[in-house]
Image: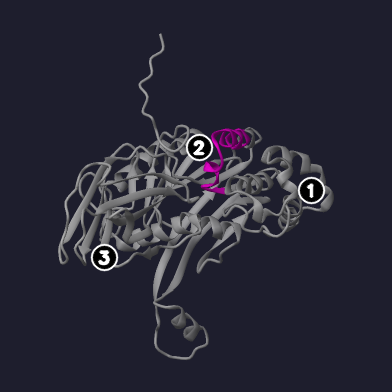
Amino acid sequence: MSMTKPAIIVSGISKKYKLYGKPSDRLRDALRLTSKKLYSEHLALDHIDLTIGRGETVGIIGTNGSGKSTLLKIITGVLTPTQGEVQVDGRISALLELGAGFNMEYNGIDNIYLNGMMIGFSEEEINARLDEILAFADIGDYVYQPCKTYSSGMFVRLAFAVAINIDPEILIVDEALSVGDVFFQAKCYHKFEEFKEQGKTILFVSHDLSSISKYCDRAVLLHRGRKLGEGTPKKMIDLYKQVLVGQTPVQGSGEKNLLDDEEIRAKARDAVQKGAKSEELQYGNGGARILSVSLSDDQGRKTAAIIKGSVCEVTMEVEILRDIEKPIFAFTIKNALGIEITGTNTMVEKAFLESVRAGERKTIRFRQTIDLQGGEYLLSFGVTGFEGDDFTVYERRYDALAMTVVSDKNTVGYYDMNSQITVE
């Protein structure tokens, strides 16, 4: 592969955001109503240099908050860098936020033409690709219905089909290959392999380390907005795993490790909530209050990222506000599409069947091996019970905590069966 004519050159890119305490501060600052500084600054990217050769497949890995998606958005022109320069040679198709340019009132056909023209295709060029797009999406007659009537699965299938079938010279993907069922994912990866064989340039972000290892010529590890390293996928994946377990500090930095960094955990939660199109919901009759929730690794370190197959502990601190007969403490896990994957509680586990009195505090720890597929998840918590025959919610907190599962082997469905296989 020749590196004489790079497809993408990123030179000294930095991106700084203003973080406001409340929306009114943003407005006052924008209207220059005060000379006081109403914001703090966050450096999302810090002097990133990166060259992608024509025909190269490069993966970007790192924890949430490391700057991966910000970098892709700057390369595609969605965001403007605070400092630095990007040069792109070739037509880009970007799978960053699937369906972001769709009009939900239009039907699927209308949105195909709308998106194609936004990318720069003429009506004739879209006509030539229409059958291929429809076959790839495979949503049948729903393509003639308004997109607002689609299930989330149909919506992402159509959005992906439009983006991936326009014959780009450079394909940029942000976690989009994990959409749909296993058959659609296989179709997406087959298209990926076709692109590689055709010598197209591919740049993608994924928590599925097996995909990074299988498809990438090179990997780049970002951490806290800096490039921690680049090299072979195996080398960078090994370094990434060290970061996740707190063994590798940021080069040239005396700052604390990411596993103790509240800002990183907040960013992880923001990212997955965006994917789930939801925000934390809290309600109940006031019989109890969930004071805090947290996720820890097998060494007891608070984190937002768990390596698949490892043991973690989910903890909730609860204050009892009135006498309750046999409260039930629970937590559930759902994916970024809002689908509930699993959950448990103290009643079904027969872990706590006692009554509590007002003023007590309880710490509930759920310890288990995480065999979920790599990806983004949201955790919800509850304190419930029965008053007579009536089910009662004392407090629930939906989407209260984010968890990223990092995997180097994803199987079919939501969790890994860890099968022991022999062939004779």
> Which residues make up the magenta segment?
173-193
Q: Majority secondary structure of the magenta segment? A: helix
How far apart are labels 1 and 2 at the CA level?
A: 32 Å
Amino acid tagged 2: Asp
**Mark number, residue 287:** 3
User: Viewer-nearest of labels 1 and 2?
Assistant: 1
Front in this rendered view, residue 190 or 89: 190
Front in this rendered view, residue 305 or 335: 335
How far apart are labels 3 and 2 at the CA level?
A: 56 Å
- Determine the image quadrant of residue 230: top left
Residue 243: image x %, image y %?
31, 48
Residue designated by label 2? 217
Front in this rendered view, residue 157 or 234: 157
Residue 195: image x %, image y %?
63, 37
In reply to whether residue 175 is colored magenta, the answer given is yes
Crowdedness of circle 3 by 10 Å Cα count: few (<14), some, many (20+)?
some
Between discs 3 and 2, the one toward the N terminus = 2
Between discs 3 and 1, the one toward the N terminus = 1
Is residue 349 placed above or below 114 in the rendered structure? above
**Quarter of the C terminus within the rendering:** top left
Amino acid tagged 3: Gly
Amino acid tagged 1: Ile
Q: Is residue 53 visible?
A: no
Residue designated by label 1? 126
In reply to whether residue 211 is colored magenta, the answer given is no
**Quarter of the N terminus within the rendering:** top right
